[in-house]
Amino acid sequence: MSTPRNVLFLMTDQHRTDTLGCYGNPSVRTPALDGLAAEGARFDRFYTPTAICTPARASLFTGLHPFRHGLLVNPERNGGARDEVADEHPVLPGPLLEAGYNMGHVGKWHIGRNRGPEFYAMDGEHLPGALNPFHHPSYERWLKENGHPPFAVREAVFGKAPNDSGRGHLIAGRLQQPVEATVETFLADRTIELLERYARDFRDGGKPFMLSCHWYGPHLPYLIPDHYYDMYDPSLVPLPASMAETFHGKPEVQRRYAEYWSADHFDADAWRKLIAVYWGYVTMIDDQIGRLLTRLRELDLWDETTVVFTADHGEFTGSHRLNDKGPAMYEDIYRIPGIVRVPGAAPRVVDDFVTLIDLNPTILELAGLPPRSPCDGESLLPLIRGEAADGRDQVVTEFHGHHFPYSQRMIRDRRHKFVFNPESVHELYDLQSDPHELNNVYTVPAYAEVRRDLTLRLYRELQRRGDPAYTWMSYMADIGGDRAADVDGVADEVAP
């Protein structure tokens, strides 16, 4: 059977992997995604290149590491990085459109500030911003056309500003709309409209398609209808083990971020309810995904279309006494769900390290196209088909800041994780004995060899990539005699 060329690409925002039944959660109802995983490849070591929306999405879009494409932070918190993808960079729609594809995008874009899908000749409307567009004209018009009530929230849950200036961030609230009126349903409806149009073009003229639907949730604030808000009993919700975080021996910025999000403002029962609401949000989106997959089957496209599901990054939701995301490279926000169902490929669980960037060349290979040049990813099709003998045994990620510039690099293998923090203490975790990353063993003598090995491996990988973060490591990290010979470009030409 030939590989189907159509692609339905589904993406969520700030989605914890451990909220899905197919990834081991026994309580959260996610039948659509669980069913997709049962028929496809579920990636258990799937990582975001950086746990911030815009740079992660730009990496998927370009196939490049964040330091290379230069969109290092969200536009709303921009500290001087690029706002838009450079014109010279390769972008995913280009070769697909040239190959005759219908290309559509619905929902969250957040790749830059002003250029939306229309700029790249894709079908779809630019819905700017990081959060649900409750007051966007298109959504408000759709509400009126369908007789739905307008956006309204009651019982809003806020944190507490640490400087006593008033209430802190909005975390959750009861949406005073039925599910049929939510932004999530609006996005699914728009996607179905394009899917039906593309199905006609495919049947009538053999025109393939790539159609994306990107939801804004379950990103906080969790503003969802009562049905989902109360779906899960908080008394049955376990608190994250890493809520026992003390920040001892860790970068001070993590404690400051806990204060910023006023995580300690909520007691254990309040956190159980917030986590339960987050779970409800996950189920609400899964129900909309179910609508799309059902329509795909009804249009007789199930065996003609690859379906991809992933997220741009995870969320803390109380883990490590943190919320949202930020300058801490824990599994909660760097490990993400990754499910790819290619018709004709046997179901499997993939244990190799892969990243969001790899989906760029994967989609191009599904279309029978080579990866663009340059490209920092590798197609996942050999892993999906069980044809790859050896996959990656490590992953390297990066972070450049969110509310302020802050540089980090991380390397992790199957047992250990090393986080290089140039301005602070470094972090080393033994994920076998400490899966919740509570104990920084960077200075523990028994881990000296592990520390040296991971430091050197990170240094060499950053050099290979051309990531300038390696230059600080050249003089400040435990790399032995491995320092680059000409780290400043002229060092070997200058006499001592």
Image: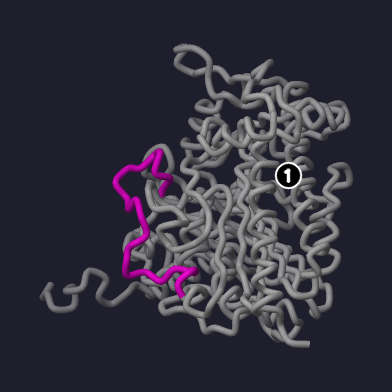
Q: Is residue 302 visible?
A: yes
Q: Say if residue 439 shows up in the picture.
A: no
- Name the quadrant of the N terminus: bottom right
Which image quadrant is residue 351 in? Answer: bottom right
Foreground: 284 or 58?
Answer: 284
Residue 84 lies in the magenta stretch: yes
In this picture, is 271 found above or below 18?
Answer: above
Name which residue lies at 64% across and 41% down. 217
Horizontal placement of 273 versus 211: left or right?
right
Q: Is 345 positioned to the left or the right of 55 in the image?
A: right
Is residue 451 in the magenta section? Answer: no
Q: Position of residue 70 (x, y in %)?
A: 36, 58
Circle 1: residue type: Ile
Judged left or right of residue 422, residue 356 is right
Find disc 1 in the rendering and name its residue: 285
Q: At 85% from the left edge and 44% from the top edge, which residue is drawn?
A: 29
Image coordinates for residue 313, horizontal then vertical, percent: 59, 51
Packing grade of label 1 (10 A; few <14, some 14-19, many >=20) is many
* Snapshot colouring: one colour
Of helix, strand and loop, which mostly describes the magenta segment?
loop
Q: Does residue 64 appear to the left or right of 201 in the view shown?
A: left
Residue 223, image quadrant: top right
359 vs 108, nearest the viewer: 108
Q: Residue at x 61, y 34 (%)?
A: 220
The residue lying furthest to the left in this view is 495
Q: Which residues are magenta?
A: 73-94
The x and y percentages for residue 108 are 55, 47
